[in-house]
Amino acid sequence: MKYVSFSDTEKIEMFDKIAAHFYEANFGQASKADIELMMFNFYIQKMIKDNQEQDGTIDYNKCSDYKISKDLGITQQRVRNLKVKNQLINPIDFEWEKAFAKLVSNAKFENQKVIISIPDPNLFYEIQNFLEEQGAYIDKQLNSKLLVIRVEYFIDLLVSLEPEHNRKEVVKEIKRVFKEQSKSEKQFDEKNIGKTLIDGAVNITTVLNNISTIVSAKNSIMISLSTLVNKFTS
């Protein structure tokens, strides 16, 4: 293997886990698919460990589907399928917000939509699930790595990631901007901020600029998104 190298200690630990599926009165009960998934889990865990950055996020350029497919001799689509299945059976904890924020800086902003490539399918599903829980939606693309979403729904994301004590202040400021732009306060729906901003045709650059000093410093998505929108609207 070119991108992953196991130490002797790690190999011993791996063998013990494999042996447990055969030598505990269960010989032959594990299917070929079970063993393949187990071997993939060893591989992906090691790759993540070797390519983890100081903030705990993963360098996706070093863990790409292409590199894994070359290493294992399988298609990139099968790599993605194994990643999804492995996350269901052997969940790997990761802070998707941090990973997402780092990718936002490489996004494009076109026609009030943010277009961003999400290299990992599990990260994509985490983002999609979160947005859908907020009543937002993404535009489906033929390219399964491409996330396309209205910038207004990112406001929902920003608000939801704010600490409880700060969230009310952020919402209050968004509501003030909404009202300032000749919109009726009665039309403002705190549970569906993104949709409210879309229906009211509110200037997103103004909203981002106004809440930038209120949003907590830990809300890394705010920094990336604000920079992105200002870059393409200035």
Image (tube, helix red, strand yellow):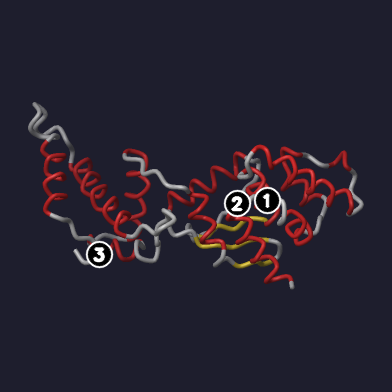
State the mark number for residue 219.
2
Name the residue located 60 percent from the left edge and 54 percent from the top edge: 139
Q: Residues within 10 Å of mark 2 (few under 14, many from 20)?
A: some
**Quick one: SS at disc 3?**
loop
Q: Nearer the viewer, residue 79 or 92?
A: 92
Q: Residues within 10 Å of mark 1 (few under 14, many from 20)?
A: many
* Labels 2 & 1 near each other (Cβ < 8 A): yes
**Quick one: SS at disc 2?**
loop
Lower position in the chain sequence, tag 2 or tag 3: 3
Q: Residues within 10 Å of mark 3 (few under 14, many from 20)?
A: some
Q: Amino acid at mark 1?
A: Val
Q: Nearer the viewer, residue 25 or 4?
A: 4
Query: Which residue is tagged 1?
Result: 215
What separation in Å lies between label 1 and label 3 (alpha carbons)? 40 Å
Q: Amino acid at mark 2?
A: Asn
Q: Is residue 94 left or right of residue 82?
A: right
Name the residue located 59 percent from the left edge and 58 percent from the top edge: 148
State the mark number for residue 3.
3
Q: Is residue 54 left or right of residue 133?
A: left
The quarter in which the N terminus is drawn is bottom left
Q: Is residue 163 left or right of residue 180?
A: left
What separation in Å lies between label 2 and label 3 (alpha carbons)? 33 Å
Q: Nearer the viewer, residue 43 or 71?
A: 43
Q: Position of residue 183 (x, y in %)?
A: 89, 49
Q: Amino acid at mark 3?
A: Tyr
